[in-house]
Image (cartoon, rainbow, N blue to C red):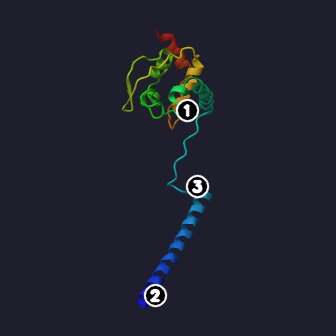
Amino acid sequence: MKKIFQIVTIICLTLSFLSCKNSEKSDTNLKDEVANPTEKKDLKEEVPQPDPATAKSIAAGESVYTQNCAVCHQKNGGGVPNLNPPLKGADYALGDKKPLINLLLKGSSEVPIKVNGQTYSNVMPSFSSLDDAQIANVLTYIRNSFSNNASAVEVSTVKEIRSTSD
């Protein structure tokens, strides 16, 4: 019995020693990853930075969003369940710009609506009081925030759609 106890003790100590060695090796690998992050192939790719004009539009759009949109769509773009749809990952926010611009200019009383398989029942007011630059900026912000990545909305596009809308 004493012999079995000694063998078990030796096995446990050996496993413990090996575990410590693997832990040290893991710590070394972690230090290397932190020190040299670009050398690792499996790290998440960096999102390309927008051109300066788009970056300026995004920054201006954030202010418009905070003042006019965040109360319904939330600061994080997640919306309010059953009331206001999310902007994060929503096809209507990332797709064709014309319907999106029209939505801001005219609003929508079409309820209920389905977005990403969920039903929402709140109306969307018109924001036609915003000027063309504000609408372009806020839509560019929405299309490039909340993990969204879509092209910028140009002021000229908003101006053209506003002039042809009823």
State which tag comes first along the sequence, 2 or 1. Answer: 2
Q: Is residue 124 above or below residue 150?
A: above
Residue at horizontal 57 percent and vertical 17 percent from the top: 132
> What SS does tag 3 mark?
helix
For residue 122, which quarter of the picture?
top left
Residue 6, numbered label? 2
Disc on the earlier residue, 2 or 3: 2
Looking at the image, which is closer to me, 17 or 90? Answer: 17
Is 25 rendered above or below residue 41?
Answer: below
Mark 1 or mark 3, earlier in chain = 3
Residue furthest front as drawn: 1
Q: Amino acid at mark 3?
A: Pro
- Which one is in front in this view, the residue at disc 2 or the one at disc 1? 2
Residue 48, position in %: x, y?
56, 40
Q: Which residue is mark 1?
A: 75
Mark 2 secondary-structure assignment: helix
Give me the disc on residue 37.
3
